[in-house]
């Protein structure tokens, strides 16, 4: 059972917040290109591998929101390359928290190995659409 749900902007923030509310745990929004310019809190951030459009994104969140001992589940709407989930897992590790996995609505993972390494669970496979 997670103690924190992590949701990347923008649709991940919506489904992540709904998941956190349903489970009764905290929610942390993982933002793109955010950090010290946004506020004075300490931020953790990392850059993704190229996504499905060959772009790299910098994601981060306030460091104080994920603590050592937290069990973190990332929730998003869609998984393609897994780049967002991989960087989310690294950020969770940077905080000393425990990554328990990723969940999404649609699984379109290009690399099936990542599905097992993350682990990733989904409501639908892209081939069902």
Image: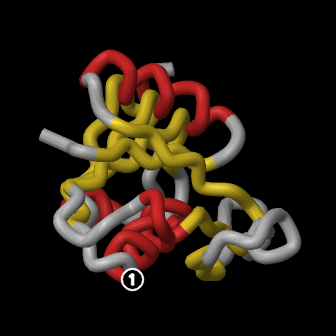
**Residue ID at (74%, 61%):** 32
Answer whether residue 20 is visible to the viewer in this image: yes
**Residue ID at (20%, 43%):** 2
Residue to which mark 1 is pinned: 94
**Along the line of sight, which residue is nearer the eye, 35 or 124?**
35
**Residue ID at (66%, 70%):** 41
Residue 89 is drawn in which quadrant?
A: bottom left
Q: Is residue 126 above or below residue 23?
A: below
Q: How is the image coloured?
A: secondary structure
**Along the line of sight, which residue is nearer the eye, 29 or 49?**
29
Q: Is residue 80 above or below residue 56?
A: above
Q: Is residue 43 above or below residue 99?
A: below
Residue 9: x percent and y percent?
A: 68, 45
Q: Name the secondary structure under disc 1.
A: helix
In this view, which residue lies farthest toward the right? 37
**Along the line of sight, which residue is nearer the eye, 89 or 38?**
38
Question: In this image, 36 relative to 21: left or right?
Answer: right
**Residue ID at (27%, 63%):** 118
**Along the line of sight, which residue is nearer the eye, 123 or 57?**
57
Residue 35 is drawn in which quadrant?
A: bottom right
Answer whether residue 49 is visible to the viewer in this image: no
Crowd class of label 1 (few under 14; some 14 to 19; many from 20; radius 10 Å) = some
In this view, which residue lies farthest toward the front? 40
Assign the N terminus to one quadrant of the image.
top left
């Amino acid at each position: 059972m997670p103690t924190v749900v992590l949701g990347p902007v923008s649709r991940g923030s919506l489904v992540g917040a709904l998941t956190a509310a349903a489970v009764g745990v905290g929610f942390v929004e993982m933002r793109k290109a955010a950090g010290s310019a946004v506020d004075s809190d300490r931020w953790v951030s990392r850059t993704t591998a190229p996504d499905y459009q060959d772009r790299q994104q910098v994601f981060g969140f306030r460091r104080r929101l994920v603590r050592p001992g937290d069990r973190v589940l990332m929730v998003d709407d869609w998984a393609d390359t897994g780049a967002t989930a991989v960087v989310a897992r690294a950020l969770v590790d940077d905080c000393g928290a425990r990554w328990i996995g990723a969940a999404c609505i649609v699984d379109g993972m290009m690399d099936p190995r990542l599905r097992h390494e993350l682990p990733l669970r989904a409501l639908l496979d892209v081939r069902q659409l």
